[in-house]
Image (tube, rainbow, N blue to C red):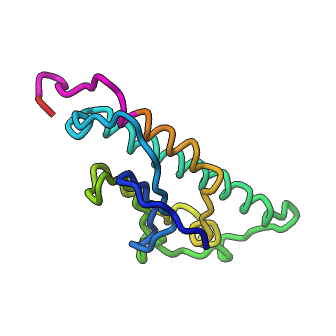
Amino acid sequence: MKKVEKTPYEFYLYINENIVCQRYFQLRGYNENVLHSLELKELIDTVAKIVQKDLESKTRDYLYSHFNPYDVQKSEDIQRINVFDNEDVFDVEVRVSDKIIAKKRFTGNVYPPKVRYSVNIKELIPEIISNIQETLSQKKYTTNYAGIEL
């Protein structure tokens, strides 16, 4: 296992409060005005959307690999269960100096169990980190929205 230098900037992905991914990253020019900005909300929405799109893509691949066009499905063969009875939730977090500055939660129950329990976002990390770095180091932020101070 590689020893990783701890920096004050971190990204986390959880499923049911279990860490799936944790990354430390460097950042030049951190601007604390981001803490009360609209861009921070847009950032966490973007990061969550990146993860969700990856899960959707893997879901399509998984479902297509198990699809049999010659198998006729009857109404009585369909299981009628509520998939939200035992909900699995994903959390995306951005931290600065061990303080959570942005967090977004979304359900994992819309994805098959095989997909949501074998999450691998290794190839998405550079895109996610660059989005976070770009947002946290901007010079100007939107701190007033519709006449309300954020």
| 27 displayed left or right of 146 | right
Which percent across, then down, holds residue 37?
24, 33
Rendered position, 40 above or below 91: above
Q: Position of residue 99 (x, y in %)?
A: 26, 57
| Residue drawn at x 60%, y 65% as measured from the top left | 119
Image point (43%, 59%), residue name = 12
Q: Is residue 57 above or below residue 120?
A: above
Bounds of the magenta segment: 135-148
Which picture quadrant has residue 136?
Answer: top left
Where residue 62 appears, x then y in whole percent? 72, 62
* Magenta residue check for 137: yes
Residue for point 28% across, 34% down: 31
The quadrant in which the C terminus is found is top left
Return the residue nearer the eye: 83 or 53: 53
Give 80 or 131, whichever is nearer the viewer: 131
Q: Is residue 18 above or below residue 37?
A: below
Residue at x 31% of width, y 49% of height: 102
Q: Residue extending furthest left?
A: 148
